[in-house]
Image (cartoon, rainbow, N blue to C red):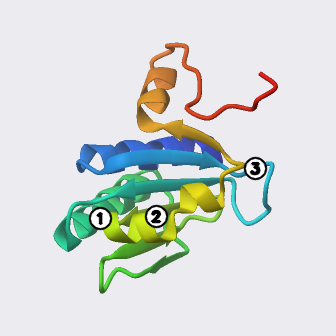
Amino acid sequence: MEPEALSELAAGAARDKKAEGVMLLDLRELTIMCDYFLICTARNTQHVKAVVEGVQERLEDAGRRARHIEGKSNARWVLMDYGDVIVHVFLPEERAFYDLERLWADARLTELAAVVEQARGVQHVDARTDASL
């Protein structure tokens, strides 16, 4: 499965579990570490675990297993490494503190609504676009 499709599948799974602030950061032009970050927020530790399990199940059903999952025991910030896609599930205070969107501010950022519209064939302009566009 291509990284873009994998990230969209993970984003849909997170949203199905009622994750909030679901964002895809396109890192392809910025790093060789991975192609995409999926970042989302859960309301409490139980919700973090539910989102993580939902993403994990959906991607396993598609034939992809996480290489590594970190932070699941304390469930404040869980990182799921799928190679080309890294999923971050945060509690609100952790997301605000680490502010990955700011750290990777040069990344092209897409809200989940845009991903859903693209999958349905609806035209969308990214939330953050290159100034030259």
Residue at the (37%, 62%) spot, across then down: 56
Tell me the SS state at disc 3.
loop
Q: Left or right: where does residue 35 sit relative to residue 54? A: right
Within 10 Å of disc 1 (Cα), the crowding (few <14, some 14-19, many 20+) is some
Residue pointed to by mark 2: 88
Asked whether residue 43 appears in the rendered view, the answer is yes
**Disc 3 to disc 1: CB gap under 8 Å:** no
Q: Nearer the viewer, mark 1 or mark 2?
A: 2
Q: Left or right: where does residue 56 sit relative to residue 83? A: left
Residue at the (45%, 18%) spot, across then down: 120
Quadrant (top left/top right/bottom left/bottom right) for the C terminus: top right
Residue pointed to by mark 3: 28
Residue at the (43%, 37%) spot, across then down: 112
Q: Earlier in the sequence, mark 3 or mark 2?
A: 3
Q: Nearer the viewer, mark 3 or mark 1?
A: 3
Mark number, residue 53? 1
Residue at the (51%, 23%) spot, across then down: 118
- Specify the farthest residue to the bottom: 73
Name the kind of residue labelled 2 in the image.
Answer: His
**Disc 1 to disc 2: CB gap under 8 Å:** no
